[in-house]
Amino acid sequence: MITIDISDGKTSFRLAFSGKFNFITGLSGTRKTLILKFLQKYSHGIKSIHAKIMLDGAQLTKQDIFLFSNELSTDEIILQTLTQRTGKLYVIDESSPLLHMRNAGEIMKKSENFFVIITRELLGYLPISIDSIYYIERRGKNLVNIPVYCHDNEALTVIQNKVDYILTEDGRSSRLFFKYFFENENLQVCSEYALRNGKKLSRDNSQLVNFLEEELENGHSHILVVFDAAAFGMYYDILLKLLKEKKIKTVSILAWNSYENYLLKCEPFRMTLTKDDAGCNYNSLEQFSTKVLKDMITYQKSNLPGCIKGIPCNLCGLSKCSYKGKKRDFVQGPLFQLKQMQNNNPQNT
């Protein structure tokens, strides 16, 4: 958890962030750039500025905070220092040349630092969690960061209608999960690839809304759209606009943090991981959850492991599995609701 409390005696910011990448958005005049100006004055030792900046309970010094705006020149050398420092806080304005440097996204993802990026438009080259997108609002005497969409990605999940088609951005593991647990004569799961002019197109975050629009045009209306919200922030608004423009009220949404994060919450693992657990060592909660799951079972994104199906895996055969013989229940929460809908209305799902 990162907290930034900074004030000039008249205006006070009280900001809180979790995870590696956080974005403050908004149009001009919404005071988002004022945050950087306050921090610059603080870093220069202006006495009228009082600040307390914390990371996981420890106070950061001025030397731990790096600020970038159009007033500061930058070059490839400065960009490379991102991978040499660890556990630092970078606050970057959209006007900074750093964001437009060649390979900026790859270097930021490789670094082990925290980023607060002030921008009107999100960056397509970074994994953005939907609940890491904020705007600035006045609450009483303070200016605070408010989530644009939600405090918790899973709060976006809404399954109120029957479902006869499941569309997921994951072409492999989670798609196979839905085929194994849910597909039947009344409910179809999307294929691994989509064919366009004889070419295979993978289903990913950037294409999910396009595929949804095509499915709606092809007659599917009761669709469950599944996406890993820990990396879907760039596309969520596009999804909302499509549903609004089409006036679609029969599409349901399953916005889990990630498929792997969901599995870890279930029996037999019962492990709840958050962005704070991922810290700055991982680019997203999805990436961290995948690493943890791989360390526990023989998990690969390319298939549905027997462990999830309840079939002994290689570790079980070697008697090294801590979960051998334990109860498995991977249909929980909203997915349990979906299963109930299937069981109660076999002719309508």
Image (cartoon, rainbow, N blue to C red):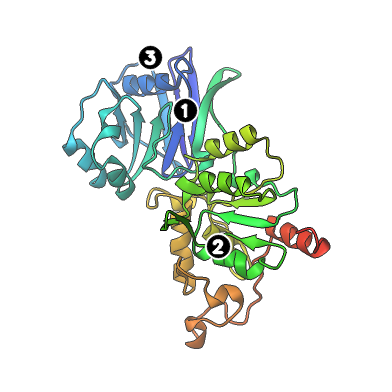
Q: CA distance from mark 1 to mark 3?
A: 27 Å
Q: Quadrant of residue 62?
A: top left
Residue at x-position 38% and y-position 14%: 48
| Image quarter hosting the C terminus | bottom right
Residue type for callout 3? Ser
- As displayed, is residue 319 above or below residue 101? below
Taking depth in this image into account, of 244 and 32 the one nearest to the observer is 244
* Residue that mark 1 sits on: 25
- Reading the chain from its start, which is encountered first: label 1 or label 2? 1
Q: Position of residue 92 (x, y in %)?
A: 34, 30
Residue at x-position 52% and y-position 61%: 260
Q: Is residue 200 visible?
A: yes
Among all residues in the image, which is located at the extreme front? 197
Element at badge 1? loop
* Residue that mark 3 sits on: 48
Element at badge 2? helix
Q: Is residue 237 left or right of residue 28?
A: right
Q: Is residue 270 left or right of residue 279?
A: right
Q: Position of residue 300 (x, y in %)?
A: 45, 69
* Number of the front mark, 1 or 2: 2
- Reading the chain from its start, which is encountered first: label 1 or label 3? 1
* Residue that mark 2 sits on: 175
Q: Is residue 86 visible?
A: no
Q: Position of residue 67 (x, y in %)?
A: 31, 29
